[in-house]
Image (cartoon, rainbow, N blue to C red):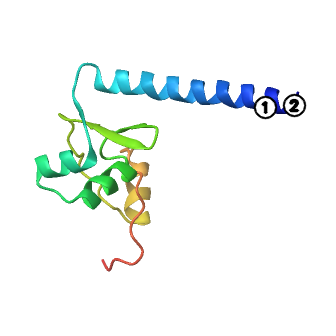
Amino acid sequence: MIGEALVAGLEAAVRAIVRDELERAAALGAGAELVTVAAYAKRCSLSQSTVRAAIADGRLEAVKIGRAVRIPATASIARPVRNVSDAERRALELVGVRSPSTPRNPRRKP
């Protein structure tokens, strides 16, 4: 009894997750071809690790369908946000300029 209810609940949860992923893929692709990480990397003359890093950083939009990652064939990698020091960020905020949200890399020497 409890086992059947647990299985039914698990099946419903999996269906909901798959449905959400498919809807997101359809909205992201919207008629565009979705390609694998390897195909995108080859098309753009990049390494697969560079493409995966761009996805992880949020610079390249991708959709995950189950365990598979797909990228719109027409997508491009956004430029990284410039790092600024805390002092420069405060100065920009004082004059009303919105500063980049990425903090400065503390290991990098100025």
Q: Secondary structure at mark 2?
A: helix
Q: Nearer the viewer, residue 107 or 6?
A: 6
Q: Is residue 100 visible?
A: no
**Which quadrant holds the N terminus?**
top right
Quarter of the rendering containing residue 106: bottom left
Task: Tell me the crowding category of disc 1: few under 14, some 14 to 19, or many 20 or more residues within 10 angstroms, Cα based.
Answer: few
Task: Name the amino acid, label 1.
Answer: Leu
Q: Secondary structure at mark 1?
A: helix
Q: Which residue is mark 1?
A: 6
Q: Position of residue 31 (x, y in %)?
A: 24, 19
User: Badges 1 and 2: C-beta atoms under 8 Å apart?
Assistant: yes
Q: Nearer the viewer, residue 64 or 61?
A: 64
Is 16 situated left or right of 53 in this image?
A: right
**Which quadrant holds the C terminus?**
bottom left
Q: Nearer the viewer, residue 56 or 42?
A: 42
Q: Which residue is mark 2?
A: 2
Is 4 situated left or right of 97 in this image?
A: right
Q: Position of residue 14 (x, y in %)?
A: 60, 30
Task: Tell me the crowding category of disc 2: few under 14, some 14 to 19, or many 20 or more residues within 10 angstroms, Cα based.
Answer: few
Quarter of the rendering containing residue 75: top left
Is 23 situated left or right of 78 in this image?
A: right
Q: Position of residue 98 (x, y in %)?
A: 38, 44
Is 94 situated left or right of 3 in this image?
A: left
74 up-or-down from 16: above or below: below
Q: Nearer the viewer, residue 77 or 29?
A: 29
76 up-or-down from 11: above or below: below
